[in-house]
Every structure is written in structure tokens, then in C-alpha cells.
Amino acid sequence: MVRPTAEQQKQWNDAGYLVFEKAIQGDDLKRLQDAFDHWSVVCKEDWLNQVEAGESTATFYDIPDPFAKDEIFVDLIDHPSYYGALMTFTDDQLILLGPQVRTVPPWPLSYISWHPDVPFSNPLHIKVQIYVHDVLPESGEFAFVPGSHKLDSGPYPKVKRARSMPGHRTFPGEAGTAIIFNTYGWHTSMDIQTGIARKSIILIYEKSTPNRVSPDRFAAIANYCVTPQRRRLFSLEAYES
Amino acid sequence: MRAKIDSHGHVFARASTEFPREISQLMPEDRQESVEKLLAEMENNRIDQAVLVQTGGANIASHTYLLHCLKSYPQHFLGIGLIPPDTSDCASHMDRLAENSAIIGFRLSALGGPRDPFAPIDVSRFETFPIWKYAAEQDYVLWLYLRAMDAHLIPYLLEEFPQVRVVINHLGICPGRGKFSVDQDGRPQVETPSYNPAFHTTHRLARYENVMIHLSGQYAFGKEAYPYRDLAGWHRSLVGIYSAERLMWATDFPWIFNNPGYGKMTRIIDELLPELSEHEYNQIMGGNAKRFLRFPDCQN
């Protein structure tokens, strides 16, 4: 396991995020792109029907149940590029809450406003956003307000345009880039001005607390979880308290 | 004293040769919900003015009762008409209804653009583009209660026509196909998920200054009985996103007449948004409608 450097640890503590360029590359990236693109096409019509039925939004869509569709999505969960950092930041008590294999079509504005995901009373909650294809500036790239994960930060204004948030940083990046961020912090997806859909995967983790995730949640992929580390990561087994 | 304005409701007469209209499960032939009945409720609850929205048909003849009401009570009401989807001359239809009447705009339930959000967008090819263009030219208001599949198309038209005043109905909810029904109280019901797609469509349009949102229709979407506290979060969220200057209260009379009753609906904002300042409350209860829709001064 590759633990974060002192510099990375400091950046995580101070800014609330880390960027891993080329986190996924080579054959892994190719496998990921192929699986993502294939299942996006296969699942699209169901999504459009759900939009029509008022059950899903038209402004993004997630491939449902990705672990059942391709093992590459399972392999991302503890990918060596960032797994060590996630374990370190959660005191080796990392659990997965779920994946979002997400396509964001072009739209005149972002599908989501600036927001934190959880209150400070929540256990440490981390997301990893992985770009499946290149994400250019003004193409729905991830954005974060450095330092906004700290209890004494803010308050932050309700801005009508994403680019109006004071102190924010945007993260365009090449395919395979992974951005880890503390979701107490304020973040968003920037407007897509380029006409290019954003394709990314958002992995949601938390520091383990008792009974947070049912052992049944990921039981269907138990065959992929043969090590104790993976079984705990997927809540098939509990961490020792 | 500030005017209180009910910014969305319906009246209709029994179907007759004098007042022809379409017949439906919600509006059987003998049902009438007269303007006098609404006026009595308004007076009892100190509501000064209201917007009457056409129901019962989009052709000119079907608007006869609405036009009669607007003419009879010009100090109390403004009107919103309908446009037949198959009309070849929407401008003529719009003008015929608005000329010498208090009809200020038109309600749309579809935009006629591509279903697929990945499709190339050319708003001039939307079926309703001529309506938007004419509304821009004539300063008509557009009143949107769209199908879910149209929600993502709204901002393209807002970008093209920033001068058109737009009112998005009923909390910004865009009903899904097959999700309409009528309940035992004769009210429309819309099956609506609690994590609503509107959060990522109509609730994202606050940057467009020409958009207002109705705080109304709770009875159709709420899972709980009045005061529909399960929807309080949606109301607070809309205040946070749009601010109190961009929201308009409405009862959606007559559907609420028996359950929960007009009087209770006049208090729903107090129930769901008790934290509003007096100024914010007054804006939502009438100030915004008066300014945005240009209601005439009333005599309280």
C-alpha cells in the first residue's frame, strides 16, 4: 500500500483535496473507458424512459449497478494509486458507500450548485472523482473551495454562477485523473460551455462506524472480495472496534 | 396595506352553449367552480386579487367563461390562456385572446424540443419557438407546467428570450408520464419522488432573472396531509435558491376547496416557511405577483 507523502498529508489537511494525475492509465484506463462507454450506450434508453416518467433528471445519468456490469468498476474502489491515501486519512477504517458512474450532458448551466455533502457531525466522508475521458476547462470539471472543509471556514455565499464562488479552484484534467476530496468542503461541477459531455466516476467513502453499511449491500460481489481488506472495505466484514 | 394575490387558480362554468368547455374526470359536465365562489373565499380570507388560469380547452370558444370573468371583475383578476398544440397561427390565437382583455400570458405543458439531452439543440426548431418569439415581441407572460421530459429544455429558451417573463408552476415540479391521477376529493395527484428531478432542472434556473416559481400545488405532491410538512424542505430550498423576491404563493383553487380548504391554503406559507421576515412574507404573498405580473392597484 502506498501511503501519502508528508507533503500530500499537509495538502489534505490544509486544502481538503489531493489530485492524482494518471491515477488510472494504460490498459486499466482503456478497460475503464471501454466499459464506461459500452454501458452508457446500453443503459441510455432506460434512463430516458425514467426521465420521461419523472423519476430521473435529464441533466445527468448514472449507469445503474456498475459492479454487476464490469469488474473494472470494482477494481477502482481500492486502486493502488489512491487507496493508501484513503486508508491513511480514515485511520485504516475505510468503507465504501457506493459508486456513481456518471455522464453529464451539455447544458447551459451546471446540474448542481455549490454545496458540501455532509455536516461536520458526520464521520469523515470522502469522494474520489475519476475522469474517464479528458475533461477540458468549462466542461463540467470538478471545482472545490480549498480550505472549506474546515470547521471554522465560511460562510460561503449562494452564487448564481459557479464561477462567482470566492476562492474556488477548478480541476480540468486528462483521462485517468483522480481527485480525492473531503466532502465537508464546498464543491460543484462547473458549467459545460464546450458542448462535450463529462464522463466521470464518483466513488463515495466514509470512515467506518458500526452498522453504517449492511453486509448485504455488496454481497453480490463477494466473489471479488477475497482479502480481509476488501471484505472490510465493502462491509462484508466489520472492522474490529 | 399590501395586496395579497393568489397567483394561480381556475374557475369554470357548467359545460353549456354559453360557456363551452371540454369535459374530463376532473371537470365533469355538471361541475362548476364559479368566479363568485372564488371571490367569496378571497373576501373571507382577505385575498385581494388572483390569476385565473384557463382550464377546459385551448380553443377560443373554451375561453368564453374566463374572458367573462376577467371582464366582470377587472380589478380582481388577470388571466392566463391556453394555446392549441396544433394551431398553425399561434400569434393570431394569442392576440385574439389578449386583445381588450386581462389575459396577460399563456400556459404551456410542452416545449417541443428533443427528448434526448445529448441531441444537438437548435431552439428555432422547437415546436413552441414561435410562441416564445411572439411572447417576447408582445410582452406576454409564459406560464410553465411542463412534462418531465421537457424540463431540461427550459434554459435554452431562457437564454434565447431573456425578456420573456416566465412563471414556473407548482414548486417547479414537472410531472412524469403516467403519474397523474385524481383522488377521492376530486383533486389532481402527481406521483412525485421525494428526491425530485426538479432539483437538477427547474431549481437550477435562478440565474435567469426573468423566472418566477410558484409555491403551490402541495396537495398534489405531498405524501402527508395539510400542511404538507414533508414539502417544507423544498420550500426552504427554493427560498435559498431563488430568494423570496422570486417566489409567488398560490392556492390552485378549486382543487383545494374541500381539502384542505381555501382558508388553510392562505396560511400555508406561515406553516411551511415560518422563518420568513415580514417583508419576505409580503413579497411571496402578493408583492412579487403584483410587480412581475403588473396587477392593477386594488381597493383592498
Image: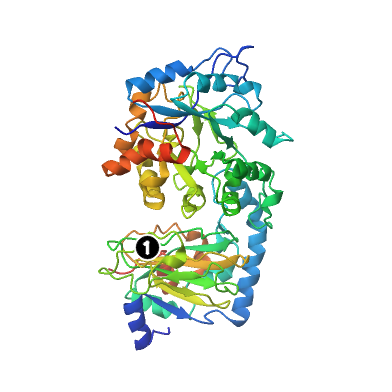
Residue at x 38% of width, y 59% of height: A158
Give me the chain letter of mark 1.
A
Residue B83 seen in this snapshot: no
Are there few (<14), some (14-19), or many (20+) residues within 10 Å of tag 1?
some
- Outermost residue to the left: A152
Residue at x 38% of width, y 71% of height: A145
**SS state under label 1:** loop
Residue at x 61% of width, y 65% of height: A197
Residue B13 seen in this snapshot: yes
Q: Nearer the viewer, residue A61 or A167?
A: A167
Is residue B170 placed above or below B34 in the rendered structure? below
Quadrant assignment for the N terminus of chain B: top left
Q: Quadrant of residue A188?
A: bottom left
The x and y percentages for residue B138 are: 60, 40
Q: Amino acid at mark 1?
A: Pro
Q: Nearer the viewer, residue A46 or A3?
A: A46
Is residue B185 placed above or below A129 in the rendered structure? above
Residue at the spot of label 1: A116
The x and y percentages for residue B47 are: 36, 27
Quadrant assignment for the C terminus of chain B: top left
